[in-house]
Image (spheres, grey):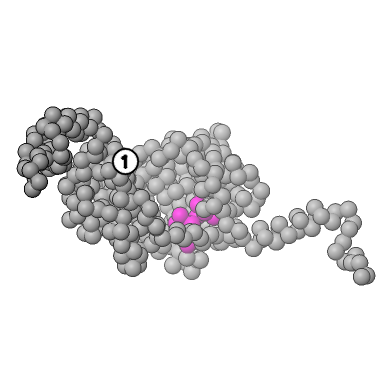
Amino acid sequence: MATGHLKPRKCADGTMSYQLVVETDRDPITGKRQRFYKTVKGTKKQANAMLRQMIFDLQNGTVTTPSAIKLSSWMNTWLNTYLPNIELTTRDGYEEKIKNYIIPALGHIPLNALNNQTIQSWVLSLSNKGLSPKTIRNAYNNLNAALKKAVVLRMLPYNPCDGTVLPKLQKYNAQVYSIADIQKALAAADCISIYLMILLGATIGLRRGEMAALRWDDVDFAKNTVTISTNRVHTKRRVVEKAPKTQAGNRTITVGEDVITALREAKALYDVCVSTTPGFKDLGYIVWKEKTGEPYHPDSLTQKWERFVAKNGLPPICLHGLRHSNATALIAAGVNAKVVQHRLGHSDISVTLNTYTHVLPSMDEDAASKLDQALFSSGQSLNHLPTR
């Protein structure tokens, strides 16, 4: 509870003034009290009335009490106190941004000394270091969220991030495989895990974590469907299997006869390994380590793919590029965008259309051909030009 008292002072002209001193409760983080001062002229009765009003305003949140806690302490408090249940992978990302980008440059500054000019200079310094606009925005978003919370808690009168100009995001243009490239990659596959990675990525559009987590129980061979409900990801502490981030990520999709046949043959090979390979663990993973049956670390899948691409002279796309290739092939085949969105597990169709589909030369040629058919199917031709 806030408390206060008066300090009477005699002015040079002989009149009286009073200094109002109001002290807040201890800051729960720093353990320190804050004092507010105001000097007024008038009678002691008037000064007491103003003192009571100041105390009332502080106790009822009308007046903000800027905190002197350093930003480094507040960022850690914000993360650990107000975000205790976020995903481990999300926490890792936040901690990395706070540790590497926020605290080294701004951690020593008290909250009540932060201003927009300081934050704008920080953003510019990150750009000058060569960080990508996306990385800068992610770090800024962490800082902005923490300071927004400080405003809500009345530790700050306003958010000093307001008005900050951020670098423009660059559109991500992934490299994709054509149908011929996918066929070539499948033909070059020299082990079952590589073959299945290509199959799951290019024909079903799985992320690498979904590939690593997929089990035989997720395949319904009678209905030709695959259910994706688990993602295998690594944190700073360990590899974990968790549900997709959004409800749309939980999905059951139909696959073609050729794909289900390939999966059926792979299951038969898996069963042989279970019965004949010493030390093989029947854990049920579709992409399994050939000697042990254990699942792959997500990073191991990436490294395995990169070695395979380099060894076989294939176009150098990342493993996630197979997912891009799948989306592009579906759009090129005329599949409705909402269907593509469902198959990829996107909650927002704009992600499907803006990020995961790419215009191939064949698609552009097909568009020109269809436009010709639509405009001139009645026999009208551009060759029938007016003579003047």
For the residue labelled by badge 1, is the local secondary structure a helix, a strand or a loop? loop
Residue at image position (59%, 41%) is: 338
Residue 76 in sight:
no
Give whichever of 305, 293 is nearer the camera.
305
Name the residue located 13 percent from the left edge and 29 percent from the top edge: 45
At label 1, which amino acid type do we have?
Glu
282 is within the stretch colored magenta: no
Task: Give the left or right position of residue 92, taking residue 378 as reference.
Answer: left
Q: Which residue is mark 1?
A: 87
Q: Residue at x 58, y 60 (%)?
A: 178
Which span of residues is magenta-colored?
317-325
Answer with the quarter of the image where residue 366 lies.
bottom right
Q: Looking at the picture, tell me which residue is in the foreground, 282 or 79.
A: 79
Q: Nearer the viewer, residue 250 or 382?
A: 382
Query: What is the crowding at mark 1: few (fewer than 14 residues within 10 Å), some, or many (at least 20)?
Result: few
Query: Vertically, is 78 above or below 161?
Result: above
Count every numbered label the image shows and give the total: 1
Q: Say whether residue 366 is left or right of residue 224.
A: right
Residue at x 42% of width, y 52% of height: 193
Q: Is residue 208 left or right of residue 374?
A: left
x then y, percent, for residue 348: 51, 42
The answer to whether residue 138 is above or below residue 267 is below
The answer to whether any part of residue 43 appears in the image is yes
Residue furthest to the front in view is 13
- Is-magenta flag for residue 320? yes
Q: Would residue 332 appear left or right of 126 to someone viewing this image?
A: right
Q: Position of residue 190 (x, y in %)?
A: 45, 59
